[in-house]
């Protein structure tokens, strides 16, 4: 099967079977690198990094060069014509006419999607703001699979900043898809966002349990207060009581401990933040002496700061430098597949833990905008050609998800195209949570963020508009 | 014919025939890229970009790589030893000993000429301040020729900021050389500078007509107020009256509409500038509905901001992304020719619309300097080894043109080496516009910017010194 | 002999014989470049430049490309994850898993040593702060050897800023090793640091003479006041009296004049510094008219500012652009040797002018730190894993040399592990210069920078603690 001309913007752009096939190819490439040294000869990769990066950029570039391909690089927004007010769509079209594949990192969420839409060549998202970083997720999965054969059924604890890290959100969905049991161990104030949890519970198989009152022994704050436990594959083990402690869960042993860095944007500027930093969980040899970590893979996306001690480096359970090193074969496999330089046998997807959901689309010009200021659809240079667009992921409460950055909004008012038939006097709007609103079919739905917006579109308050 | 070891600093460094030959090679390279994949094997291109650029740098680099060559890159003055006070001549010599060809973009006007003088290898100017950007001009010409077979006799309207854009000035001379009819349609306050017009009228064949009082219909400001019309090849059509409107001229139809961006340095900071920005002409689908644009190629050097609407992108007349894409074969052809990797058949130059002018040179050390503060000859690091040098392009009024940046000056005073024969008491200076001054032969001419300069060189005011 | 998997952090990492062998290979590569065009095929060099550089980086990259290898580059600390607080050790490990060899320039002294310790692949120091720049030294030696066959016995004058330049300190040791006679001609206030002189006199063969009261003729300040004269190979010529002027020495003629730039960190900000700048010696054609310079190679590491006039460029004695150009074959030879792509015959080291010294090591955690604030061992991100470590290079006065940056310190207090046998009441410290202190064997030595440090480690003042 050929993956030629496909893009990888989010980890969902690849099926479980495709990921498995990619990993098999990565295995081959790691084993016999010489055999693949000319695979991408004559091909050019453009490496466009509008945010700091060492490992990601250099591993993509090294990967392309090891396949015999060539690389052109732009590393700083200041050194490019984006400084002249150009849109990323224009940039994508032009670079797409020089290169055979584009790797992009950009601070705006959804930027990689836009580049993929306009470039005319395959595009790989190397991190778009706090949105996704799918090749990091591939490296994480590949590391686990390499060391434990399969992800399915493993118990994996996620540790630290589960709120901001894009690597973690991508990883959570990916682990869920492959049937891992996930234990969330966030630092104080750094819990997994609700929208991630909701998405986990609606779009992936398995059950989600929240454990509030932890059975903590004083002075032994092994794990932070709030824990959430996702067990997609062992429903019979889910008879958890609200008071079952995470400690007890951890005691059963974990297969992998995924540690994350406190994100820069959260670095201590206020007193409260400094406290948060002090309370940030730290993984060191002392912690890893616990029975529950006896066979645990210690993982980290790097760069680390203080959350992962240097004394772990010599421990055979430490996986983080292997993770980084696996970036090479994984990215080589990905590049050669998207460039169509090789094909793979894709296994059947019989074990996928994804619930397929075909959400209706909303793209009327009714003034509703993505609430994320950092979304590509809200940028001055991009509004010239991008219209906001959403998936209707829930009707009660009515919830729209931005197709670019996956942020969600719950608009206040709705109307229906059926009601007014173009007659001005029939143009009425109602509260989104009224029983009336629920009856509107998705294809007729008109959504307003506010009463002002509704009035601006010549709608008047209806009976059920509070 | 071999173009090996030649440099391209201004578009005039190539004859019409050489440009045609280069285009034929570009055609071949676009048609059968695989055939040229190893043409520059073993060659190294140094890509030195001291100003922001995406498309130009990446297209040069992609071009070199597609020819099998290799690339070394320096993209920021801050990251190089120029920060240590090194001259660009020293930098050029050193880089010239590592690379086989140098591509340079630099903010100083004339910098590429200096690099070409010192590097010892071929140098390509990828933009030197507001001076020239000859490969952009090649892409523009190539696009027109590709779509309309020949430039000769075409009616081409230039639109927008005709004052600051280096791409536009290079293009104007090039279009004149190939015998196009050019219609200037500047934004308010953004007219073609007088020195460009004078040069057009003296160094190129054809006639220049100015149309002042335009026959404008109220509310239909299709074209800005001032228009200048160059028709090098159809002198019989030149019986234009001053009141013939540009509109009428436009009505005859144009073959290409070349749109330019309002240059950054003009971006609205004062009230007057904000007005200028508002008055900037905008090209969109509505404008292009006009009969006169029925078969018009819509061109733009990119990046665009607001002067060219996104709704034109899908229009088959839009050429700007093609223009950018043609950068690849055009630059590939150029690189391989200057590297001597291939030769071409150069057609005879029978149709050139250039008037050959061999201006005398002025390089005496009489204190006269280029008036352009941004000229390479005025930079602190460069005055250590560069002497100002000029072409005497006019005697009445006496006009010197800087050989580095092409800026012109009209010095106030002159003297002659013949008069004084080394005797101090005979050292007299006279006004440059006196009848006396005109009699001095070019080889004897001494020029002073001011009376102070003259006195500093021990000259006293003569009879005709006002 | 294979040099595979070795690193070049300081010039001392290569023996005289290895340097000779490397130069022979460089000769071959310069003579028949085509023969080596595929030598490093399939190999990747990572070029990590955390400080400005043109010539060094581009020559390494060009060298690698000319050997058929490939390059990945990171040029600015701002564009990498060091900005996220990552240690250079972590960065080294990760990049070492992508590349086959690493070239690093870093502002911290000792940084290259750390990278070499952690990368797992060969590392080349391309300049670490004011510490070393060994490939520049190789180019300097290669130039001299190329023009004069051998360095041994040559008279070489070092000129200008002998205090700050890292290129000069590396070069001094290297010239001493190869048996050159060195004449130091510093600018005022820019003398060779004492620690360099001491090291010269203890670790290299030859004698060091200081000439204070120079026999200067008024108005002819050919050479600055203080001069130091190292003659390793001609002890019979060393009967110099203190009043023998440097002028007289110079008059005997010099084989090479090595000019250096006034380091940026010394550029005139105060009145005193501006005077220093004015007094900085300048080399120009006038100076070189002297008999003593008749056959002198004029060398400079570049970039130059004003210390070396442009009028020397055309002089056949000028070597500086050759020096830069030789960077290519020298670095090609080095890269291919460290990558194990080729082997060389290493001649016997019979002429080395090095005195072998095996200094004992001090690495107890007694609070003593390198005094150099810019040393890698004092950086916030690095203290997480680096312990200070020193060589004990002298006992009277007790002198420790940092193994990372070679800076020295003379600690105030000492103790011995023998004395206290773990008993708290016996833990006493004494002055480092007491006769008592000298009796402590190196392996028992405990060193304290201050009385506070000693007390913090539970030691009390002993009899001989002043």
Image: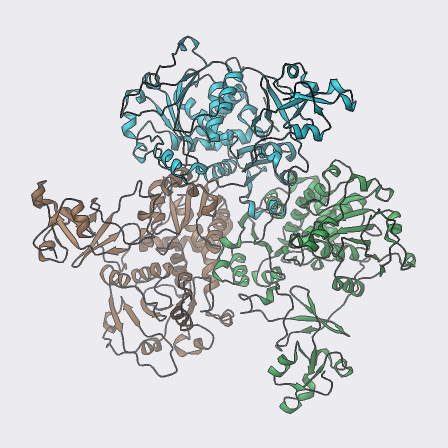
Chain colours: A brown, B cyan, C green
In the image, A230 versus A340, the foreground residue is A230
Q: Position of residue C352 (x, y in %)?
A: 80, 58
Q: How many marks?
A: 0
Residue at 47%, 30% in the rendered image: B167
Q: Position of residue A344 (x, y in %)?
A: 37, 49
Q: Position of residue B231 (x, y in %)?
A: 43, 15
Q: Is residue A386 left or right of residue C172?
A: left
Residue at 70%, 55% in the rendered image: C272
Image quarter hosting the N terminus of chain C: bottom right
Q: Is residue B316 left or right of residue C463?
A: left
Q: Is residue C399 visible?
A: yes
Q: Position of residue B51 (x, y in %)?
A: 51, 41
In the image, B268 versus A412, the foreground residue is B268
Residue at 75%, 38% in the rendered image: C312
Q: Is residue C457 above or below residue B4?
A: below
Q: Is residue B231 left or right of residue B393?
A: left
Image quarter hosting the C terminus of chain C: bottom right
Q: Is residue A98 above or below residue C366?
A: above
Q: Is residue A69 visible?
A: no
Q: Is residue C281 left or right of residue A110?
A: right
């Amino acid at each position: 099967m050929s993956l030629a001309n496909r893009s990888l913007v989010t980890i969902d752009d690849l099926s479980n079977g495709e990921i498995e096939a990619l990993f098999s190819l990565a295995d081959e490439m790691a084993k016999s690198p010489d055999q693949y040294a000319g695979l991408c000869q004559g091909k050019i990769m453009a490496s466009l990094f509008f945010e700091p990066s060492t490992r990601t950029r250099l591993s993509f570039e090294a990967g392309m060069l090891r396949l015999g391909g060539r690389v052109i690089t732009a590393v700083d927004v200041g050194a490019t014509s984006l400084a002249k007010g150009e849109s990323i769509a224009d940039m994508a079209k032009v670079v797409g006419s020089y290169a055979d594949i584009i790797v992009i990192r950009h601070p705006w969420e959804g930027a990689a999607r836009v580049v993929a839409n306009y470039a005319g060549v395959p595009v790989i998202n190397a991190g778009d703001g706090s949105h996704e970083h799918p090749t990091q997720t591939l490296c994480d999965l590949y590391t686990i699979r390499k060391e434990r054969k399969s992800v399915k059924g493993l118990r994996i604890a996620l540790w630290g900043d589960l709120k901001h890290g894009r690597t973690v959100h991508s990883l959570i969905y990916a682990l869920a898809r492959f049937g891992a049991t996930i234990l969330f161990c966030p630092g104080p104030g750094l819990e997994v966002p609700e929208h991630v949890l909701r998405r986990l519970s609606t779009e992936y198989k398995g059950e989600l349990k929240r454990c509030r009152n932890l059975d903590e022994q004083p002075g032994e704050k092994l794990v932070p207060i709030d824990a959430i436990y996702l067990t997609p594959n062992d429903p019979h083990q889910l008879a958890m009581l609200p008071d079952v402690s995470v400690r007890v869960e951890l005691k059963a042993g974990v297969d992998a401990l995924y540690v994350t860095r406190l994100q820069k944007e959260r670095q201590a500027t206020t007193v409260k933040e400094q406290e948060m930093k002090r309370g940030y969980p730290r993984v060191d040899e002392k912690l890893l002496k616990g029975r529950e970590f006896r066979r645990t893979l210690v993982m980290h996306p790097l760069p680390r700061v203080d959350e992962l001690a240097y004394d772990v480096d010599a421990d055979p359970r430490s996986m983080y430098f292997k993770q980084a090193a696996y970036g090479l074969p994984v990215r080589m496999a990905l590049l050669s597949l998207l460039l169509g330089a090789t094909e793979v046998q894709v296994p059947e997807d019989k074990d996928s833990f994804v619930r397929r959901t075909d959400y209706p689309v909303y793209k009327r010009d009714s003034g509703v905008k993505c609430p994320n200021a950092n979304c590509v659809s809200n940028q001055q240079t991009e509004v010239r050609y991008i219209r906001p667009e959403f998936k209707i992921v829930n009707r009660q409460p009515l919830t729209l998800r931005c197709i670019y950055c996956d942020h969600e909004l719950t608009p206040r008012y709705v109307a229906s195209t059926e009601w007014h038939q173009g007659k001005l006097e029939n143009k009425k709007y109602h509260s989104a949570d009224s029983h009336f609103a629920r009856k509107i079919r998705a294809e007729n739905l008109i959504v307003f963020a506010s009463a002002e917006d509704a009035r601006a579109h010549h709608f008047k308050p209806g009976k059920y508009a509070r």
